[in-house]
Image (tube, rainbow, N blue to C red):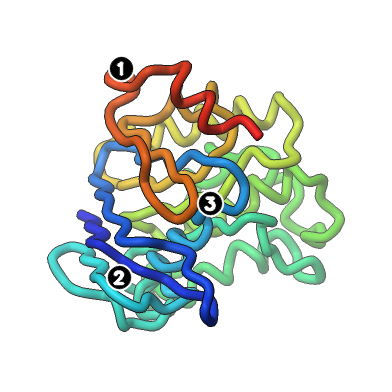
Amino acid sequence: MLEVKNIVLHYGAAIALREVSLTAVPGEVTCLLGRNGVGKTSLLRAVTGAHPISKGAIIWEGSDISRLPPYERARRGIASVPQGRDIFPLLSVRENLETGFAVLPRAQRKVSDEIFELFPILKTMLGRRGGDLSGGQQQQLAIARALVMKPRLLVLDEPTEGIQPSIIKDIGRIIALLRSRGTMAILLVEQYFDFAHELASQIVVMDRGDIVLSGRPDELDEADVRRRLSV
């Protein structure tokens, strides 16, 4: 479904990604692991169109989307939950959810009941401003907003960062449920090995802009992976 082929990404003269390749397919979670600053977020930015690549190709559902702007990729079914959540603090929870309507045909612009089944706390807070929510509630709102877009690829950048353990468990259950349906590919950046290992169908470890390890969780040496995550 998603093929990243030998992409190179620069920030000015600095190189952030070096000939990076990976795939993400429906019904699986492809998990990117690595220390801070090794290129994980840059790879997600390349996939979503937030930053142009210098070389290589990004293939989505058989089409090269390497030069498409972010809004066109969103229209093609790619939804992103960025690090830091980026909700609109002055908009209500309902209004934040409705920003996901922008990429949908008018007839589909409705927040489905399923969103509130996944995130029941949001149903009780529809009139509250996004900025008044706790960090964990904001993270749930950010994921829910992405799901309103009815994506076929969900890109998650460290959804557990700064979140209380109970909500981390809830987020893990939701990712596992979405994976089990088999209709969505999930690309997940994480730093917590245990969370990633439980959810991942494929683990990709990055270091200094390169992929240094990849494979199914049961194929990789856990001690080696953990060593590459330690500071």
Q: Is residue 146 above or below residue 75?
A: above
SS at mark 3 in the image: loop
Q: Residue 160, image x and y in percent?
A: 64, 38
Q: First in sequence: mark 2 or mark 3?
A: 3
* Residue picked out by circle 3: 38
Q: Nearer the viewer, residue 6 or 72?
A: 6
Q: Is residue 111 visible?
A: no
Q: First in sequence: mark 2 or mark 1?
A: 2
Disc 2 from disc 1: Cα separation: 33 Å
The amino acid beneath tag 2 is Arg
SS at mark 1 in the image: helix
How many residues crowd mark 2 within 10 Å: few (<14), some (14–19), many (20+)? some
Disc 3 from disc 1: Cα separation: 24 Å
Q: Residue furthest front?
A: 13
Q: Residue 67, image x and y in percent?
A: 31, 83
Disc 2 from disc 3: Cα separation: 28 Å
Q: Which mark is residue 218?
A: 1
Q: Is residue 162 above or below residue 42?
A: above
Q: Residue furthest left?
A: 62
| Residue for point 57% across, 43% down | 116
- Left or right of 169 on screen, residue 200: left
* Residue picked out by circle 2: 76
Q: Kindly report which numbered mark, 2 or 3, lies closer to the viewer in this rendering.
A: 3
Q: If the image is split into quadrants, where does the C terminus sit? A: top right
- Left or right of 60 on screen, residue 212: right
Q: Nearer the viewer, residue 134 or 73?
A: 73
